[in-house]
Amino acid sequence: MTPPRRTKLIETLEDQVACSFHEAFDALPAKCKPRTSENGVREWVPLSGIAVVGEDERVKCVALGTGMKCLPATQTSLLANGHVLHDWHAEILAIRAFNHFLLQEARSLASSSTYQSLTLRRREAESVAPQCFGNQPFTLCEGLKVMMYCSEAPCGDASMELVMEAQEDARPWPVAGSSDKIVPGLLGRESFSQLGVVRRKPSRGDAPPTLSKSCSDKLALKQCTSILSSTTSLLISPENAYLDTLILPKSQYRPEACERSFGPQGRMQPVADRIWGDGHAFHPFRVRTTNLDFSYSRRNAMANSNGESKGCNISGVWTLGLQETLINGVLQGRKQTDPKGASALSKAKIWELFLELHKLVISDDSILIDMGPSLIRGYVKEVVKEEALQGWDQGAV
């Protein structure tokens, strides 16, 4: 399917960021893009990406992902081997791809004394100590802004107004046995008038339930733990690794929803003034809008299919030096039980990359990496879940 020509002008930095991801996705192979059926119905898919923006406002697109599915709860115990992704919503793939990119950059820095990274730098020897942001040997460069673009409002609390607006029957979907009380860990859209609560994927009521928290909840937590994963944070300090801006199309932005879901006056208020140390604190990101819309958005698919559209089951992943096409959490064409189907973003492959980098760091710098940063990060997560994102641990990952 040839994407529609873009006619809207790029007027703002947010437009520039969005356009960079649209163009990066357009350049990917056709096998990882939505299709058009023989009867003319077009598929759609959410796109998310992470860019770094320098002080000169030059935009560098470094990671993107598309997707809208996750692993059913009935399969998580059967496929808990680290080879299968449990959540391949676009936002989560983009974050995992960004972490993969950072580990690759760290490996290049550890392998060569002359390598210059635009994103990452070595930390000075005097700062690599437990009392100073842990002992991670790398950090993101100062002055960089980490920006995230999403072609759809993140599922969960930040999109509940959009869900309600789209209902022919505005009455909330009930929760069995819940009456009118607030139930933490709600499934998808059920009881959608209950706002500010933690929700599980998927949003569709007829889809198999999962154990994955909504993208709104996961992004809210990232404001306290940084954009780094638990593995990446063993080698890279979180001190500069927080999202500065979340960019949404204007049609997907509801100010009250975003402030409630992410802002210091919303559900994150109990931790809004927290500074835990070791690079962890509450860093609320700004939410900004773009006039540009993704060619493969649901809105464009419906407009070009006489009001009909279908979600795409294919996920595309791209970062510098990596491009993958995924179905059901593994590489396209592979079975979920086949270790050769593991994505480079899977826990197993990320851990392999970490171990390779760990050996380089020890050999080069004689720095022993301990698990201290992981313990601190775990403590922060527990505090945020208990005080702000209540109900997180009720059957979800």
Image (spheres, grey):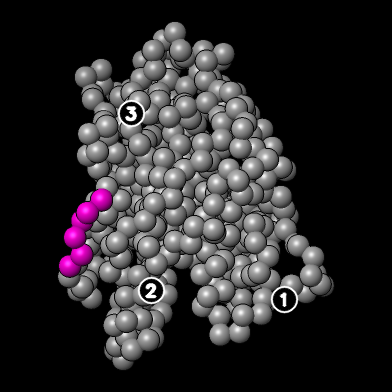
* Residues marked 2 and 3 touching at CB (< 8 Å): no
Specify which label sits upstream in the sequence, 2 or 3.
Answer: 3
Type of secondary structure dominating the magenta stretch: loop
Q: Which residue type does callout 3 highlight?
A: Gly
Q: Say which label, 1 or 2, has the lower sequence index.
A: 1
**Which mark's residue is nearer the viewer, 2 or 3?**
3
Residue occupied by mark 2? 298
| Residue at the disc numbered 3 | 143
Q: CA distance from mark 3 to mark 1?
A: 47 Å
User: x, y (%) of residue 200?
Assistant: 62, 61
Q: Is residue 10 magenta?
A: yes
Please report the residue visible at 49 percent of the width from the left and 66 percent of the height from the top: 69
Q: Does 14 sit above or below residue 326?
A: above
- Crowding at dot 1, Cα within 10 Å, few <14 / some 14-19 / many 20+, comes out as some
Q: Residue 342 placed where, x, y %? A: 44, 53
Question: Seen from this angle, which residue lies furthest top?
Answer: 126
Dot label at residue 86: none
Number of residues whose C-alpha sits closer than 10 Å to that of mark 2, classed few (under 14), some (14–19) or many (20 or more): many
Q: Magenta part of the protein: which range?
A: 7-12
Question: At 45% across and 36% down in the image, what residue appears?
Answer: 242
- Is residue 313 highlighted in magenta? no
- Looking at the image, can residue 242 be seen? yes
Mark 3 packing: few (<14 Cα in 10 Å), some, or many (20+)?
A: few
Q: Amino acid at mark 1?
A: Pro
Which residue matches tag 1? 174
